[in-house]
Amino acid sequence: MQKRRMGKGLGRGETIAGLLFASPWFIGFILFTAYPILSSIYFSFTDYNILSDPYWIGTENYIEMFNWDPAFWKSLWNTFYYVLFSVPLGISIGLMIALILNADIKSIAVYRTMYYMPSIVPIVAGSILWAWMFNPNYGLLTLAVEAIGLQAPAWLGDPRWAKPSLIIMSLWGAGGGMIIYLAGLKNIPKTYYEAAELDGANLFTRFRRITLPLLTPTLFFQLIMGIIGSFQVFTQAFIMTSGGPNDATLFYVLHLYRNAFQFWRMGYASAMAWVLFAIIMVFTVINWVGSRYWVHYDQG
Amino acid sequence: MAQHNHATSSAQSQSGQFTNWYNAHRKQISHIVRHLLLILGSILFMFPLIWLISTSLKADTQIFKIPPEIIPRPVVWKNYTRMWTYFPFLQFLKNTVFVVVMSVSGVLVTAPMVAYSFSRLRWPGRDFLFMIVLGTMMLPGQVTMIPLYVLFSKWGLVDTFYPLWIGTWFGGGAFNIFLVRQFFMTIPRSLEESARIDGANQVQIYYKIMLPLVRPVLTTIAIFQFMGSWNDFMGPLIYINNQAKYTLSLGLRLFQAQTAGAQTEFGMLMAATCVMVLPVIVFFFIGQKQFIEGVTLTGMKG
């Protein structure tokens, strides 16, 4: 605080230097974020195909979306379904692996790498690989299910199985969260567990009363980021199913992409983008409000 | 009566023996159970990748054999040698490398600059603007996607590589700025004050003293950006039309779509997929320590 008031001349020099050093961000922010945000709001109230000028139509895009576009509702439902399963399941599996790994195991680095690796596989490569895994004739998953004597579903070819298949694929990347939970677990002081053990608390109680509460801030952050990321699911559906079969994997962003870059309905797609933003915001706010009841911030 | 007594006591001592034995070996038992679970799980997680590599090394006839065989017999390299001439993967690779180099450079040059300003220099409005930096992380890319496309098309830059990397030269994104800033914050203030007394100016302090100190996090953001640009699909999909300018992710997708169902090209598709995965894994191993630190730092509190 005292240092803050050191000489005026130095302060001015520092301000100029500060603005200069930050200038790339200023320019980038105005050019590639602020201006696009404003024009996106404007576009969302227009009919715009890029070739001719935007034509103001008021709230008609929004009205059409909610009333006259069944594919919008379908894509919204598909995306909700995907988020609802892939996020909690992904977090649970990542946490489970982290709990098993969190011991004085010599080979921890090897295991950690093996669980983590799938999460960094490029999404295009992952999609092609999993399309092969789900192949109805030769796919490894098909053959594995048939090997135990069951009838394998058509996976991506079956409207009932297409979304669950993509969710299964997403769980393959659960190791990404595992790395983060592992770091969170390492931050919990060992003495807590030792004290609990002396009091006769069993494994489950220790997890329920120590591990879980102290990990809630990390889980909360992962939940929010997971929801934001999953709402934007696109590439898998684009490559593996093209939104099919029977629109079963027509996700929100895929529908948005088609409107923008296949039908050149830029105004409508902009309106869709803002609705997506609003949905994500609502979920984030609900999470923040809800977090008061389960996230513990009392640690240090 | 006596016999009965004897029987119960022996059963008791037997179960007692088991409890004793269990207590004595509890550590080892939990260790073994843990390892069994971990091995089982890692087989599950690694198998798709192993299967991918194995398929890419098989002859066409072995790929579609039922029951499937894990080990390629014989090991065939034909898929890897043929794919480059069969399809313009070499061109796609060159394009991707260009975009990666340009965007990684952009991030490395500008992210530390901006982060330095937001952490070590004091100027009015700084903390408020940093909130905005963090706020942009919450904005889904779809919101700016369309106006950006309109902007780049007005500038005549559609179907060029510019839209894919130019943005990284303006601070390198909120995520990278945040990461480097966290590192700058840990450096003691006295360091630059003594440099200033010695007569160093801001640029010298930044370039000669501060930048070398955050070198580990520069590795982290370089790897992040490499992966981001290497993996990017939506960007090239929107901006690149001419096949000669395709990146690997786009080219791989095109190859998959064109050869759908053709068994003779499937081995090459798998080989090309491996080529796409391999550099990511190599860079992950090279920078594993910094990479994981970066992931956990941003993943725990944002």
Image: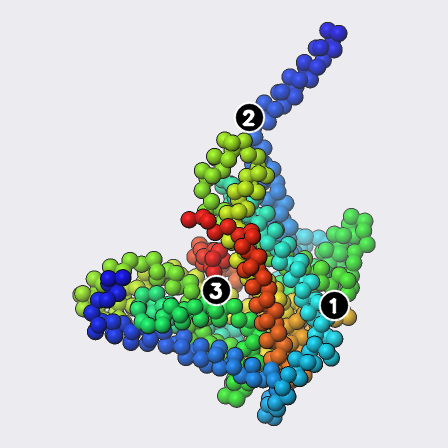
Residue designated by label 1: A248
In the rendered image, the residue lying farthest to the bottom is: A52
Are discs 2 and 1 both within one chain?
no
Residue designated by label 3: B224
For this view, does B177 lie left or right of residue B210? right
Percent position (x, y) of residue B80? 60, 65
Residue type at tag 3: Phe
Q: Residues within 10 Å of mark 3 (few under 14, many from 20)?
A: many
In the image, what residue occupies the spot 42% across and 49% down? A300
Using the image, name the chain to which the residue with label 1 belongs: A
Check contact, mark 1 vs mark 3: CB within 8 A: no
In the image, what residue occupies the spot 54% across and 31% down? A200
Report the front residue among B206 and B139.
Answer: B139
Using the image, name the chain to which the residue with label 3 belongs: B
Check contact, mark 2 vs mark 1: CB within 8 A: no
For this view, does B274 lie left or right of residue A33? right
Q: Residues within 10 Å of mark 1 (few under 14, many from 20)?
A: many
Image quadrant in which you'd find residue B22: top right
Residue designated by label 2: B24
Residue type at tag 2: Ala
Q: Secondary structure at mark 1?
A: loop
Indicate the quadrant containing the N terminus of chain B: top left, top right, bottom left or bottom right.
top right
Q: CA distance from mark 2 to mark 3?
A: 47 Å
Using the image, name the chain to which the residue with label 2 belongs: B
In the image, what residue occupies the spot 72% across and 78% down? A67
